[in-house]
Protein backbone atom coordinates (compact mmCIF):
# COMPACT_ATOMS: atom_id res chain seq x y z
CA UNK A 1 0.00 0.00 0.00
CA UNK A 2 1.28 3.46 -0.82
CA UNK A 3 1.14 5.94 2.02
CA UNK A 4 0.82 9.70 1.59
CA UNK A 5 3.86 11.78 2.49
CA UNK A 6 2.00 13.21 5.48
CA UNK A 7 1.20 9.74 6.87
CA UNK A 8 4.83 8.75 6.42
CA UNK A 9 5.97 11.94 8.13
CA UNK A 10 3.75 11.38 11.18
CA UNK A 11 4.73 7.71 11.31
CA UNK A 12 8.44 8.52 11.14
CA UNK A 13 8.29 11.57 13.41
CA UNK A 14 5.19 11.17 15.55
CA UNK A 15 4.30 14.37 17.42
CA UNK A 16 3.47 14.52 21.11
CA UNK A 17 4.13 10.91 22.04
CA UNK A 18 3.82 10.33 25.75
CA UNK A 19 1.73 9.91 28.82
CA UNK A 20 0.27 12.36 31.35
CA UNK A 21 -0.95 11.61 34.84
CA UNK A 22 -4.46 10.36 34.19
CA UNK A 23 -5.47 11.16 37.77
CA UNK A 24 -4.62 14.86 37.49
CA UNK A 25 -7.70 17.10 37.60
CA UNK A 26 -6.80 19.10 34.50
CA UNK A 27 -6.03 16.00 32.41
CA UNK A 28 -8.60 14.20 30.28
CA UNK A 29 -7.83 10.71 28.93
CA UNK A 30 -9.50 8.93 26.03
CA UNK A 31 -8.76 5.24 25.37
CA UNK A 32 -10.58 3.94 22.31
CA UNK A 33 -10.45 0.88 20.08
CA UNK A 34 -9.66 -2.71 21.03
CA UNK A 35 -6.62 -4.94 20.61
CA UNK A 36 -8.54 -7.63 18.71
CA UNK A 37 -9.54 -5.00 16.14
CA UNK A 38 -5.91 -4.06 15.64
CA UNK A 39 -6.31 -0.44 16.79
CA UNK A 40 -6.07 1.14 20.24
CA UNK A 41 -5.55 4.88 20.70
CA UNK A 42 -4.85 6.70 23.94
CA UNK A 43 -5.16 10.48 23.67
CA UNK A 44 -4.68 12.83 26.61
CA UNK A 45 -5.24 16.57 26.97
CA UNK A 46 -4.26 19.07 29.62
CA UNK A 47 -6.80 21.87 29.88
CA UNK A 48 -6.20 25.30 31.43
CA UNK A 49 -8.92 25.63 34.08
CA UNK A 50 -9.28 29.40 33.46
CA UNK A 51 -9.24 29.67 29.70
CA UNK A 52 -10.49 26.12 28.85
CA UNK A 53 -7.70 26.03 26.29
CA UNK A 54 -5.99 22.68 25.64
CA UNK A 55 -2.42 23.55 26.50
CA UNK A 56 -0.88 20.15 25.91
CA UNK A 57 -1.81 16.85 24.30
CA UNK A 58 -0.13 13.42 24.24
CA UNK A 59 -0.89 10.17 22.50
CA UNK A 60 0.10 6.54 22.23
CA UNK A 61 -1.32 4.31 19.52
CA UNK A 62 -1.29 0.60 18.73
CA UNK A 63 -2.32 0.35 15.11
CA UNK A 64 -1.31 0.71 11.50
CA UNK A 65 0.64 3.67 10.13
CA UNK A 66 -2.55 5.56 9.32
CA UNK A 67 -3.84 5.10 12.87
CA UNK A 68 -0.57 6.41 14.28
CA UNK A 69 -0.64 9.36 11.87
CA UNK A 70 -4.31 10.16 12.62
CA UNK A 71 -3.73 10.31 16.37
CA UNK A 72 -0.46 12.20 16.01
CA UNK A 73 -2.25 14.78 13.87
CA UNK A 74 -5.13 14.94 16.34
CA UNK A 75 -2.77 15.95 19.15
CA UNK A 76 -1.30 18.70 16.96
CA UNK A 77 -4.74 20.01 16.09
CA UNK A 78 -6.25 20.07 19.57
CA UNK A 79 -3.33 21.95 21.09
CA UNK A 80 -4.15 25.63 21.47
CA UNK A 81 -7.85 25.08 20.85
CA UNK A 82 -10.55 25.48 23.47
CA UNK A 83 -12.40 22.34 24.44
CA UNK A 84 -15.42 23.45 22.40
CA UNK A 85 -13.27 24.17 19.34
CA UNK A 86 -11.61 20.76 19.65
CA UNK A 87 -15.02 19.07 19.63
CA UNK A 88 -15.59 20.58 16.19
CA UNK A 89 -12.73 18.54 14.66
CA UNK A 90 -14.27 16.00 12.30
CA UNK A 91 -12.80 12.74 11.10
CA UNK A 92 -13.29 13.93 7.53
CA UNK A 93 -10.84 16.76 8.20
CA UNK A 94 -8.24 14.16 9.18
CA UNK A 95 -9.00 12.06 6.10
CA UNK A 96 -8.44 15.12 3.93
CA UNK A 97 -5.27 16.29 5.63
CA UNK A 98 -3.62 12.84 5.51
CA UNK A 99 -5.14 11.76 2.15
CA UNK A 100 -6.35 8.53 3.75
CA UNK A 101 -7.72 5.91 1.35
CA UNK A 102 -11.26 4.54 1.98
CA UNK A 103 -9.98 1.43 3.82
CA UNK A 104 -8.28 3.69 6.36
CA UNK A 105 -11.20 5.97 7.15
CA UNK A 106 -11.87 4.06 10.37
CA UNK A 107 -8.47 5.30 11.65
CA UNK A 108 -9.71 8.88 11.39
CA UNK A 109 -13.01 7.93 13.06
CA UNK A 110 -11.06 6.43 15.93
CA UNK A 111 -8.96 9.61 16.26
CA UNK A 112 -12.13 11.73 16.44
CA UNK A 113 -13.52 9.29 19.04
CA UNK A 114 -10.29 9.63 21.03
CA UNK A 115 -10.57 13.44 21.13
CA UNK A 116 -14.21 13.21 22.26
CA UNK A 117 -13.41 10.57 24.86
CA UNK A 118 -10.57 12.66 26.30
CA UNK A 119 -12.77 15.76 26.50
CA UNK A 120 -15.63 13.81 28.03
CA UNK A 121 -13.26 12.40 30.68
CA UNK A 122 -12.01 15.92 31.46
CA UNK A 123 -15.57 17.24 31.69
CA UNK A 124 -16.50 14.50 34.15
CA UNK A 125 -13.66 15.62 36.40
CA UNK A 126 -14.89 19.21 36.32
CA UNK A 127 -18.38 18.27 37.47
CA UNK B 1 21.29 1.37 13.50
CA UNK B 2 21.60 -1.71 11.35
CA UNK B 3 24.63 -1.88 9.12
CA UNK B 4 23.71 -1.43 5.49
CA UNK B 5 27.17 -1.93 4.11
CA UNK B 6 27.11 -5.70 3.82
CA UNK B 7 23.73 -6.19 2.20
CA UNK B 8 21.92 -5.09 -0.90
CA UNK B 9 18.54 -3.54 -0.19
CA UNK B 10 15.69 -4.28 -0.36
CA UNK B 11 15.98 -7.75 1.14
CA UNK B 12 13.56 -10.42 -0.03
CA UNK B 13 12.48 -12.68 2.81
CA UNK B 14 9.02 -13.67 1.60
CA UNK B 15 9.88 -16.98 -0.05
CA UNK B 16 6.54 -18.56 0.90
CA UNK B 17 4.83 -16.10 -1.43
CA UNK B 18 7.12 -16.76 -4.33
CA UNK B 19 10.78 -17.32 -5.13
CA UNK B 20 13.28 -15.98 -7.58
CA UNK B 21 13.90 -18.23 -10.57
CA UNK B 22 17.19 -20.05 -10.08
CA UNK B 23 19.73 -19.20 -12.84
CA UNK B 24 20.05 -22.93 -13.62
CA UNK B 25 16.29 -23.12 -14.14
CA UNK B 26 16.20 -20.02 -16.31
CA UNK B 27 19.00 -21.35 -18.46
CA UNK B 28 17.12 -24.60 -19.06
CA UNK B 29 13.98 -22.69 -20.04
CA UNK B 30 15.42 -20.10 -22.43
CA UNK B 31 15.68 -22.19 -25.63
CA UNK B 32 11.99 -23.07 -25.33
CA UNK B 33 10.98 -19.44 -25.76
CA UNK B 34 12.86 -19.13 -29.05
CA UNK B 35 14.34 -21.95 -31.15
CA UNK B 36 12.27 -24.76 -29.68
CA UNK B 37 8.73 -23.51 -29.92
CA UNK B 38 6.71 -26.50 -31.08
CA UNK B 39 3.42 -27.65 -29.65
CA UNK B 40 4.04 -30.77 -27.58
CA UNK B 41 0.79 -32.18 -28.95
CA UNK B 42 1.93 -31.94 -32.60
CA UNK B 43 2.61 -35.57 -33.40
CA UNK B 44 3.46 -35.28 -37.07
CA UNK B 45 6.60 -33.14 -37.17
CA UNK B 46 9.98 -32.55 -35.59
CA UNK B 47 8.94 -29.31 -33.82
CA UNK B 48 6.30 -31.16 -31.86
CA UNK B 49 8.52 -34.15 -31.11
CA UNK B 50 11.28 -32.00 -29.62
CA UNK B 51 8.79 -30.14 -27.45
CA UNK B 52 7.26 -33.42 -26.32
CA UNK B 53 10.68 -34.80 -25.40
CA UNK B 54 11.31 -31.74 -23.25
CA UNK B 55 7.96 -32.20 -21.53
CA UNK B 56 8.64 -35.90 -20.96
CA UNK B 57 12.00 -35.10 -19.37
CA UNK B 58 10.38 -32.53 -17.08
CA UNK B 59 7.68 -35.00 -16.13
CA UNK B 60 10.41 -37.45 -15.10
CA UNK B 61 12.14 -34.76 -13.05
CA UNK B 62 8.93 -33.90 -11.19
CA UNK B 63 8.13 -37.58 -10.63
CA UNK B 64 11.62 -38.29 -9.33
CA UNK B 65 11.43 -35.51 -6.73
CA UNK B 66 8.29 -36.96 -5.16
CA UNK B 67 8.85 -40.68 -5.70
CA UNK B 68 6.23 -41.05 -8.43
CA UNK B 69 6.32 -42.30 -12.02
CA UNK B 70 6.13 -39.93 -14.98
CA UNK B 71 2.72 -41.24 -16.02
CA UNK B 72 1.31 -40.12 -12.69
CA UNK B 73 2.16 -36.45 -13.27
CA UNK B 74 -0.58 -34.18 -14.66
CA UNK B 75 0.84 -30.80 -15.64
CA UNK B 76 -1.22 -27.76 -14.69
CA UNK B 77 -1.07 -23.98 -14.45
CA UNK B 78 -0.08 -24.15 -10.77
CA UNK B 79 -1.17 -25.33 -7.38
CA UNK B 80 -4.53 -23.54 -7.36
CA UNK B 81 -5.52 -25.50 -10.44
CA UNK B 82 -3.99 -28.72 -9.08
CA UNK B 83 -5.95 -28.41 -5.84
CA UNK B 84 -9.17 -27.60 -7.69
CA UNK B 85 -8.68 -30.54 -10.06
CA UNK B 86 -7.84 -32.99 -7.28
CA UNK B 87 -10.77 -32.13 -5.04
CA UNK B 88 -13.46 -31.42 -7.63
CA UNK B 89 -12.23 -34.23 -9.87
CA UNK B 90 -12.39 -36.81 -7.08
CA UNK B 91 -15.70 -35.47 -5.75
CA UNK B 92 -17.32 -35.82 -9.14
CA UNK B 93 -15.78 -39.22 -9.94
CA UNK B 94 -16.63 -40.87 -6.61
CA UNK B 95 -20.06 -39.28 -6.07
CA UNK B 96 -21.72 -42.69 -6.14
CA UNK B 97 -19.45 -43.93 -3.36
CA UNK B 98 -20.05 -41.00 -1.02
CA UNK B 99 -20.36 -37.26 -0.62
CA UNK B 100 -18.15 -36.53 2.37
CA UNK B 101 -14.78 -34.76 2.26
CA UNK B 102 -12.50 -33.92 5.19
CA UNK B 103 -10.11 -30.99 5.20
CA UNK B 104 -8.78 -28.58 7.84
CA UNK B 105 -9.41 -24.94 8.73
CA UNK B 106 -5.85 -23.77 7.98
CA UNK B 107 -5.73 -24.93 4.36
CA UNK B 108 -4.98 -22.47 1.59
CA UNK B 109 -8.04 -20.62 0.26
CA UNK B 110 -7.93 -22.58 -3.00
CA UNK B 111 -8.70 -25.74 -1.02
CA UNK B 112 -11.21 -24.13 1.36
CA UNK B 113 -13.11 -22.28 -1.35
CA UNK B 114 -13.17 -25.37 -3.55
CA UNK B 115 -14.73 -27.27 -0.65
CA UNK B 116 -17.22 -24.47 -0.07
CA UNK B 117 -18.31 -24.68 -3.67
CA UNK B 118 -18.78 -28.42 -3.37
CA UNK B 119 -20.98 -27.83 -0.31
CA UNK B 120 -23.31 -25.85 -2.56
CA UNK B 121 -23.54 -28.91 -4.78
CA UNK B 122 -24.63 -31.22 -1.99
CA UNK B 123 -21.30 -32.46 -0.63
CA UNK B 124 -20.69 -32.55 3.11
CA UNK B 125 -17.37 -31.08 4.23
CA UNK B 126 -15.71 -31.49 7.62
CA UNK B 127 -13.24 -28.72 8.44
CA UNK B 128 -10.97 -30.15 11.13
CA UNK B 129 -9.69 -27.67 13.72
CA UNK B 130 -5.98 -27.49 14.53
CA UNK B 131 -4.24 -27.60 17.88
CA UNK B 132 -2.33 -24.59 19.22
CA UNK B 133 0.80 -25.94 17.49
CA UNK B 134 -1.02 -25.85 14.14
CA UNK B 135 -1.18 -29.62 13.63
CA UNK B 136 -4.39 -31.58 13.27
CA UNK B 137 -5.37 -34.22 15.80
CA UNK B 138 -5.25 -37.69 14.25
CA UNK B 139 -7.97 -39.01 16.54
CA UNK B 140 -10.28 -36.24 15.40
CA UNK B 141 -9.52 -37.16 11.81
CA UNK B 142 -10.29 -40.81 12.53
CA UNK B 143 -13.55 -39.88 14.25
CA UNK B 144 -14.60 -37.67 11.35
CA UNK B 145 -14.34 -40.48 8.79
CA UNK B 146 -17.58 -42.19 7.81
CA UNK B 147 -18.64 -44.71 5.15
CA UNK B 148 -19.52 -41.71 3.02
CA UNK B 149 -15.99 -40.22 3.19
CA UNK B 150 -14.31 -40.23 -0.22
CA UNK B 151 -11.41 -37.82 0.26
CA UNK B 152 -9.17 -36.28 2.89
CA UNK B 153 -7.27 -33.15 1.85
CA UNK B 154 -4.62 -31.95 4.31
CA UNK B 155 -1.64 -29.82 3.32
CA UNK B 156 1.90 -31.08 3.88
CA UNK B 157 3.34 -27.72 5.03
CA UNK B 158 1.42 -24.59 5.92
CA UNK B 159 2.16 -21.48 3.89
CA UNK B 160 1.62 -19.01 6.74
CA UNK B 161 3.19 -20.64 9.75
CA UNK B 162 5.45 -23.23 8.11
CA UNK B 163 4.37 -26.20 10.21
CA UNK B 164 4.48 -29.73 8.80
CA UNK B 165 1.40 -31.91 9.18
CA UNK B 166 1.87 -35.62 9.96
CA UNK B 167 0.97 -36.60 6.39
CA UNK B 168 2.45 -40.10 6.58
CA UNK B 169 0.16 -40.99 9.49
CA UNK B 170 -2.79 -39.23 7.83
CA UNK B 171 -2.19 -41.20 4.63
CA UNK B 172 -1.92 -44.45 6.55
CA UNK B 173 -5.22 -43.77 8.28
CA UNK B 174 -6.87 -42.96 4.94
CA UNK B 175 -5.59 -46.14 3.32
CA UNK B 176 -6.82 -48.26 6.22
CA UNK B 177 -10.28 -46.80 5.69
CA UNK B 178 -10.19 -46.92 1.90
CA UNK B 179 -10.34 -43.14 1.64
CA UNK B 180 -8.27 -41.19 -0.89
CA UNK B 181 -5.66 -38.78 0.47
CA UNK B 182 -4.80 -35.52 -1.28
CA UNK B 183 -2.10 -33.20 0.00
CA UNK B 184 -1.23 -29.69 -1.07
CA UNK B 185 2.54 -30.19 -1.06
CA UNK B 186 3.38 -26.80 -2.53
CA UNK B 187 5.44 -25.59 0.43
CA UNK B 188 6.93 -28.99 1.25
CA UNK B 189 7.96 -30.71 -1.99
CA UNK B 190 11.52 -29.72 -2.84
CA UNK B 191 12.18 -28.36 0.65
CA UNK B 192 11.78 -31.37 2.90
CA UNK B 193 11.75 -35.09 2.00
CA UNK B 194 8.40 -35.89 0.42
CA UNK B 195 7.66 -39.26 -1.14
CA UNK B 196 4.19 -40.22 -2.32
CA UNK B 197 4.77 -43.92 -1.67
CA UNK B 198 6.32 -43.64 1.79
CA UNK B 199 3.92 -40.86 2.77
CA UNK B 200 0.83 -42.79 1.60
CA UNK B 201 -0.32 -40.00 -0.69
CA UNK B 202 -2.81 -40.53 -3.54
CA UNK B 203 -2.90 -37.02 -4.97
CA UNK B 204 -0.35 -34.24 -4.44
CA UNK B 205 -0.20 -30.67 -5.71
CA UNK B 206 3.11 -28.98 -6.49
CA UNK B 207 4.03 -25.60 -7.90
CA UNK B 208 7.15 -24.39 -9.70
CA UNK B 209 7.36 -20.84 -8.39
CA UNK B 210 7.67 -21.88 -4.77
CA UNK B 211 10.84 -23.83 -5.55
CA UNK B 212 12.77 -21.32 -7.67
CA UNK B 213 10.92 -22.09 -10.90
CA UNK B 214 8.61 -19.91 -12.99
CA UNK B 215 5.09 -18.79 -12.07
CA UNK B 216 2.05 -20.25 -13.79
CA UNK B 217 3.07 -23.90 -13.87
CA UNK B 218 2.58 -26.79 -11.50
CA UNK B 219 1.57 -30.41 -11.37
CA UNK B 220 -0.84 -32.81 -9.80
CA UNK B 221 0.35 -36.26 -8.87
CA UNK B 222 -2.41 -38.81 -9.47
CA UNK B 223 -1.65 -42.31 -8.20
CA UNK B 224 -2.00 -45.10 -10.77
CA UNK B 225 -1.56 -48.19 -8.58
CA UNK B 226 -2.82 -49.26 -5.14
CA UNK B 227 -5.23 -47.62 -5.61
CA UNK B 228 -5.68 -46.33 -9.14
CA UNK B 229 -7.15 -42.86 -8.69
CA UNK B 230 -9.57 -41.56 -11.29
CA UNK B 231 -10.59 -37.96 -11.85
CA UNK B 232 -13.27 -36.15 -13.80
CA UNK B 233 -11.50 -33.47 -15.83
CA UNK B 234 -12.45 -29.93 -14.91
CA UNK B 235 -11.19 -28.43 -18.15
CA UNK B 236 -12.67 -29.71 -21.40
CA UNK B 237 -10.85 -29.61 -24.69
CA UNK B 238 -8.24 -31.54 -26.63
CA UNK B 239 -7.83 -34.31 -24.08
CA UNK B 240 -4.25 -33.45 -23.09
CA UNK B 241 -2.65 -35.01 -20.00
CA UNK B 242 -4.42 -38.34 -20.52
CA UNK B 243 -7.76 -36.62 -20.58
CA UNK B 244 -7.36 -35.09 -17.14
CA UNK B 245 -6.36 -31.58 -18.14
CA UNK B 246 -6.93 -30.15 -21.58
CA UNK B 247 -4.99 -27.18 -22.86
CA UNK B 248 -1.80 -26.73 -24.86
CA UNK B 249 1.16 -27.42 -22.65
CA UNK B 250 3.24 -24.48 -21.42
CA UNK B 251 6.50 -26.01 -22.63
CA UNK B 252 9.01 -23.42 -21.35
CA UNK B 253 7.21 -23.31 -18.01
CA UNK B 254 7.12 -27.10 -17.76
CA UNK B 255 10.85 -27.30 -18.58
CA UNK B 256 11.36 -24.79 -15.76
CA UNK B 257 9.25 -26.85 -13.36
CA UNK B 258 11.27 -29.95 -14.19
CA UNK B 259 14.60 -28.16 -13.80
CA UNK B 260 13.45 -26.59 -10.51
CA UNK B 261 12.52 -30.04 -9.18
CA UNK B 262 15.87 -31.49 -10.20
CA UNK B 263 17.85 -28.65 -8.62
CA UNK B 264 15.72 -28.84 -5.47
CA UNK B 265 16.37 -32.56 -5.16
CA UNK B 266 20.07 -32.10 -5.75
CA UNK B 267 20.46 -29.25 -3.24
CA UNK B 268 17.90 -30.21 -0.60
CA UNK B 269 20.27 -31.76 1.92
CA UNK B 270 22.72 -28.85 2.02
CA UNK B 271 20.11 -26.19 1.53
CA UNK B 272 17.80 -27.30 4.31
CA UNK B 273 20.73 -27.33 6.74
CA UNK B 274 21.78 -23.85 5.69
CA UNK B 275 18.23 -22.44 5.87
CA UNK B 276 17.68 -24.04 9.25
CA UNK B 277 20.83 -22.36 10.57
CA UNK B 278 19.78 -18.99 9.14
CA UNK B 279 16.30 -19.26 10.60
CA UNK B 280 17.60 -20.22 14.01
CA UNK B 281 20.00 -17.30 13.90
CA UNK B 282 17.12 -14.96 13.10
CA UNK B 283 14.98 -16.42 15.86
CA UNK B 284 17.79 -16.33 18.38
CA UNK B 285 18.72 -12.72 17.62
CA UNK B 286 15.10 -11.57 17.88
CA UNK B 287 14.00 -13.54 20.92
CA UNK B 288 17.16 -12.72 22.90
CA UNK B 289 16.65 -8.98 22.44
CA UNK B 290 12.89 -8.56 22.69
CA UNK B 291 10.40 -9.61 25.33
CA UNK B 292 6.84 -10.66 24.56
CA UNK B 293 7.50 -12.34 21.22
CA UNK B 294 5.67 -15.54 20.34
CA UNK B 295 6.46 -18.14 17.70
CA UNK B 296 3.31 -19.25 15.90
CA UNK B 297 3.05 -23.00 15.40
CA UNK B 298 5.17 -26.02 16.29
CA UNK B 299 8.94 -25.52 16.43
CA UNK B 300 9.48 -29.26 16.12
CA UNK B 301 7.44 -29.90 12.96
CA UNK B 302 8.50 -27.00 10.78
CA UNK B 303 9.99 -26.15 7.39
CA UNK B 304 13.66 -25.27 7.79
CA UNK B 305 13.45 -21.75 6.33
CA UNK B 306 10.20 -20.69 7.88
CA UNK B 307 9.19 -18.80 10.98
CA UNK B 308 6.14 -16.76 11.95
CA UNK B 309 6.52 -14.47 14.94
CA UNK B 310 4.01 -12.31 16.80
CA UNK B 311 5.42 -9.15 18.35
CA UNK B 312 2.87 -8.46 21.07
CA UNK B 313 1.58 -4.87 21.45
CA UNK B 314 2.82 -3.87 17.98
CA UNK B 315 0.49 -3.87 14.98
CA UNK B 316 1.82 -5.76 11.96
CA UNK B 317 1.28 -3.19 9.25
CA UNK B 318 2.97 -0.44 11.25
CA UNK B 319 5.89 -2.82 11.75
CA UNK B 320 6.07 -3.50 8.01
CA UNK B 321 6.10 0.25 7.40
CA UNK B 322 9.15 0.57 9.62
CA UNK B 323 11.03 -2.18 7.81
CA UNK B 324 10.11 -1.11 4.31
CA UNK B 325 13.48 -2.24 2.93
CA UNK B 326 12.63 -5.81 3.93
CA UNK B 327 10.00 -7.88 2.11
CA UNK B 328 8.05 -10.05 4.56
CA UNK B 329 4.34 -10.64 5.22
CA UNK B 330 2.00 -9.97 8.11
CA UNK B 331 -1.17 -11.66 9.32
CA UNK B 332 -2.53 -8.25 10.32
CA UNK B 333 -5.97 -7.34 9.04
CA UNK B 334 -4.59 -4.13 7.57
CA UNK B 335 -2.38 -6.04 5.17
CA UNK B 336 -5.02 -8.48 3.95
CA UNK B 337 -7.39 -8.03 1.06
CA UNK B 338 -10.35 -9.04 3.21
CA UNK B 339 -9.44 -6.71 6.11
CA UNK B 340 -9.66 -9.71 8.42
CA UNK B 341 -6.71 -10.89 10.49
CA UNK B 342 -5.17 -14.17 9.37
CA UNK B 343 -7.62 -17.05 9.69
CA UNK B 344 -4.69 -19.42 10.07
CA UNK B 345 -3.35 -17.63 13.16
CA UNK B 346 -6.87 -17.26 14.56
CA UNK B 347 -7.30 -21.02 14.18
CA UNK B 348 -4.34 -21.57 16.52
CA UNK B 349 -6.45 -19.92 19.19
CA UNK B 350 -3.86 -17.32 20.15
CA UNK B 351 -6.37 -14.48 19.85
CA UNK B 352 -6.88 -11.88 17.16
CA UNK B 353 -4.42 -9.47 18.74
CA UNK B 354 -1.50 -11.81 18.13
CA UNK B 355 -2.61 -12.29 14.53
CA UNK B 356 -2.53 -8.52 14.08
CA UNK B 357 1.02 -8.52 15.45
CA UNK B 358 2.46 -11.33 13.33
CA UNK B 359 5.23 -11.34 10.77
CA UNK B 360 6.07 -14.27 8.51
CA UNK B 361 9.73 -14.68 7.58
CA UNK B 362 10.37 -16.95 4.60
CA UNK B 363 14.05 -17.64 4.13
CA UNK B 364 15.17 -18.96 0.80
CA UNK B 365 18.03 -20.11 -1.38
CA UNK B 366 19.39 -16.63 -1.98
CA UNK B 367 19.31 -15.25 1.57
CA UNK B 368 22.57 -14.75 3.43
CA UNK B 369 23.70 -14.51 7.05
CA UNK B 370 24.42 -10.81 6.54
CA UNK B 371 20.79 -10.31 5.48
CA UNK B 372 19.55 -12.20 8.52
CA UNK B 373 21.68 -10.00 10.77
CA UNK B 374 20.38 -6.85 9.10
CA UNK B 375 16.75 -8.01 9.38
CA UNK B 376 17.09 -9.01 13.03
CA UNK B 377 18.71 -5.68 13.96
CA UNK B 378 16.10 -3.71 12.07
CA UNK B 379 13.17 -5.65 13.52
CA UNK B 380 14.42 -5.18 17.06
CA UNK B 381 14.93 -1.47 16.49
CA UNK B 382 11.48 -0.89 14.97
CA UNK B 383 9.60 -3.06 17.47
CA UNK B 384 11.24 -1.11 20.31
CA UNK B 385 10.30 2.18 18.71
CA UNK B 386 6.69 1.12 18.11
CA UNK B 387 6.36 -0.22 21.63
CA UNK B 388 7.35 3.22 22.89
CA UNK B 389 4.29 4.37 20.95
CA UNK B 390 2.04 1.55 22.09
CA UNK B 391 -0.51 2.18 24.84
CA UNK B 392 -0.85 -1.60 25.18
CA UNK B 393 2.83 -2.14 25.91
CA UNK B 394 2.65 0.65 28.50
CA UNK B 395 -0.38 -0.97 30.14
CA UNK B 396 1.34 -4.35 30.06
CA UNK B 397 4.39 -2.83 31.77
CA UNK B 398 2.10 -1.33 34.42
CA UNK B 399 0.92 -4.84 35.14
CA UNK B 400 -2.55 -4.43 33.66
CA UNK B 401 -4.11 -7.65 32.33
CA UNK B 402 -5.26 -6.55 28.87
CA UNK B 403 -7.68 -9.44 28.55
CA UNK B 404 -9.60 -8.05 31.53
CA UNK B 405 -9.83 -4.49 30.24
CA UNK B 406 -13.27 -3.42 29.09
CA UNK B 407 -12.46 -1.77 25.77
CA UNK B 408 -14.45 1.34 24.97
CA UNK B 409 -15.09 0.71 21.33
CA UNK B 410 -17.32 -1.87 19.79
CA UNK B 411 -15.17 -3.98 17.48
CA UNK B 412 -15.44 -2.10 14.23
CA UNK B 413 -15.51 -3.88 10.92
CA UNK B 414 -11.81 -3.80 10.34
Image: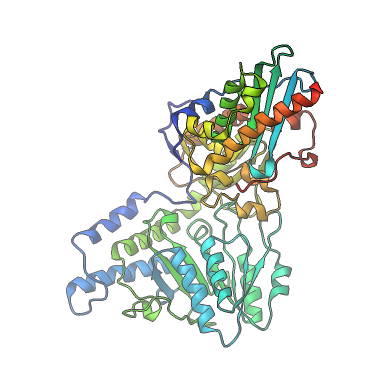
Q: From the viewer's side, name the closer residue of B31 and B108.
A: B108
Q: Residue at x 30, y 71 (%)?
A: B248
Where is residue A12 shown, x and y percent of the image?
52, 26
Q: Residue at x 69, y 12 (%)?
A: A51
Where is residue A3 shown, x and y percent of the image?
46, 35
Q: Residue at x 33, y 61 (%)?
A: B253
Q: Residue at x 59, y 66 (%)?
A: B154
Residue with the most extreme bottom position: B96
Please, is residue A4 above or below residue B183 in the view?
above
Where is residue B26 shown, x and y percent of the image?
31, 53
Q: From the viewer's side, name the closer residue of A75 and B189.
A: A75
Q: Is residue A45 shown left or right of residue B323?
A: right
Residue with the most extreme top position: A50
Q: Is residue B4 shown left or right of residue A118?
A: left
Q: From the viewer's side, name the closer residue of A95 and B393.
A: A95
Q: Splitting the image into 4 quarters, where does residue A48 fall?
A: top right
Please, is residue B9 above or below residue B157 in the view?
above
Colouring mode (rainbow / by chain / secondary structure / one colour): rainbow
Amino acid sequence: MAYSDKVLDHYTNPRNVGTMDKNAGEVGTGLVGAPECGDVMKLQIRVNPETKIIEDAKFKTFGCGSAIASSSLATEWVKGKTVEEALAIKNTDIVKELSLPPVKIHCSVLAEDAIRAAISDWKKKQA
Amino acid sequence: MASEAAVKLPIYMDNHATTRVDPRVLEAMLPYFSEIYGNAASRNHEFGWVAEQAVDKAREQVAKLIGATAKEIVLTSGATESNNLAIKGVAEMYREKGNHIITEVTEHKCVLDTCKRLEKHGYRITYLPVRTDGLIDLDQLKDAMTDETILVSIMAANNEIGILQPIREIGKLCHEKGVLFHTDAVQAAGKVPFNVIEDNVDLASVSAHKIYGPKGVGALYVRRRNPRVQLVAQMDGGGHERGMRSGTLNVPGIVGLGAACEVAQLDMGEESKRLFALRESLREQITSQLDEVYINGSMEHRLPGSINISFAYVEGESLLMGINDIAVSSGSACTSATLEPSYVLKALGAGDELAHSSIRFGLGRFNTQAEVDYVATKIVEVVRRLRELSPLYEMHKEGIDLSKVKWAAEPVNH
